[in-house]
Image: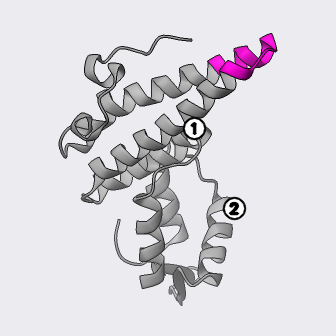
C-alpha cells in the first residue's frame, strides 16, 4: 500500500493485513487520521467524484515518514504491548522489506531481558502469595516472548541469527528456559 489513499482503503488494508493482530475500527481510524493531520504527519485533500460524495485522500508527509521509521525501529517498552505493537512492527518490516529487523529483534530481546531482571528482583523481595503468583505469571509470559523472538521472529525477519548478537547465557546457548528461583 503506497501513495495517497482514502480512509476506506486504509481501513481495508489494515483489516486484511493486521486484522488478526490489531483491530482498528472506522471511527478510531478517522480520529487518528485527524490527529495525524493536526500534527503534520499526514496531509489530506478532497477529491470530487461525479456520482458520489467527495472523498478525503491522505498522504504521509516527510515528518510522518520519520515518525513511522522512529516507531518501527524502536523496541516495544512494555510486555503488554508486544501482542499488538511489536507484531505490527514485524508486519511492516516484512511488508515494506525494511532492513534492520534483526537489530530490532536484538533491541527487543535486550529490553525484555532488562524487564526480566527487574521481575527477578521483585520476586526475591515479595512475600505475598498472590503477588508472587502474579509475578510468576509475568515471568512466564516474558520467557515465552523471549523464546518466541529467538525461535520464530528471527527466521521470519531472515536477516541472520540474533543469537549471535546476544550475551551468552544458559538460555541462549541451550535454548532451555531458565530455572525459577
Instruction: Kindly report the distance in space between the C-alpha atoms of the residues bearing marks 2 and 1.
Output: 27 Å
Residue at 47% from the left image edge and 11% from the top image edge: 179
Image location (x, y in percent) of residue 38: 65, 83
| Above/below status of 45 relative to 166 | below
One can see residue 10 in this view: yes
- Magenta highlight on residue 169: no
Which is closer to the viewer, label 2 or label 1? 1
Question: In x, y percent, where is residue 112?
Answer: 49, 37
Tell me: residue 119, above or below residue 41.
above
Q: Is residue 140 above or below residue 42?
A: above
Camera-side residue of 164 and 50? 164
Residues 171 and 161: in front is 171
**Left or right: 23, with 14 as reference point:** right
Q: Which residue is pictured at 61% across the width and 38% down the height?
A: 80
- Identified at 30% across, 51% down, the residue is 103
Can see residue 61? no
Percent x, y for residue 5? 44, 74
Q: In the image shown, does 175 or 3 lie closer to the viewer? A: 175
Check disc 1: other Cα within 10 Å, few if <14, some if 14-19, many if 20+. some
**Which residue is depicted at the point 56% across and 36% down?**
115
Q: Quadrant of the N terminus?
A: bottom left
Circle 2 residue: 27
- Magenta span of residues: 124-136
Residue 167: image quadrant is top left
Residue 107 relative to residue 125: left or right: left
- Could you tell me what secondary structure mostly forms the magenta stretch? helix
Among numbered discs 2 and 1, the one appearing first in the sequence: 2
Picture quarter with the C terminus: top right
Q: Which mark is residue 79?
A: 1
Which of the 4 image quarters holds residue 158?
top left
Amino acid at each position: 500500500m503506497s501513495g495517497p489513499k482514502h480512509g476506506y482503503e486504509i481501513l481495508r488494508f489494515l483489516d486484511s493485513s493486521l486484522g488478526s493482530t490489531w483491530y482498528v475500527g472506522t471511527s478510531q481510524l478517522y480520529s487518528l487520521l485527524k490527529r495525524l493531520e493536526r500534527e503534520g504527519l499526514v496531509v489530506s485533500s478532497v477529491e470530487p467524484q461525479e456520482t458520489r460524495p467527495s472523498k478525503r485522500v491522505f498522504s504521509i508527509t516527510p515528518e510522518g515518514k520519520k515518525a513511522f521509521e522512529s516507531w518501527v525501529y524502536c523496541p516495544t517498552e512494555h510486555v503488554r504491548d508486544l501482542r499488538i505493537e511489536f507484531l505490527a512492527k514485524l508486519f511492516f518490516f516484512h511488508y515494506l522489506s525494511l532492513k534492520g529487523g534483526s537489530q530490532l529483534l536484538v533491541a527487543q530481546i535486550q529490553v525484555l531481558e532488562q524487564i526480566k531482571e527487574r521481575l527477578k528482583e521483585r520476586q526475591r523481595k515479595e512475600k505475598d502469595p498472590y503477588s508472587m503468583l502474579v509475578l510468576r505469571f509475568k515471568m512466564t509470559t516474558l520467557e515465552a516472548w523471549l523464546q518466541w523472538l529467538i525461535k520464530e521472529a528471527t527466521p521470519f525477519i531472515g536477516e541472520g541469527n540474533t543469537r549471535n548478537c546476544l550475551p551468552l547465557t544458559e538460555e541462549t546457548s541451550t535454548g532451555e528456559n531458565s530455572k525459577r528461583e
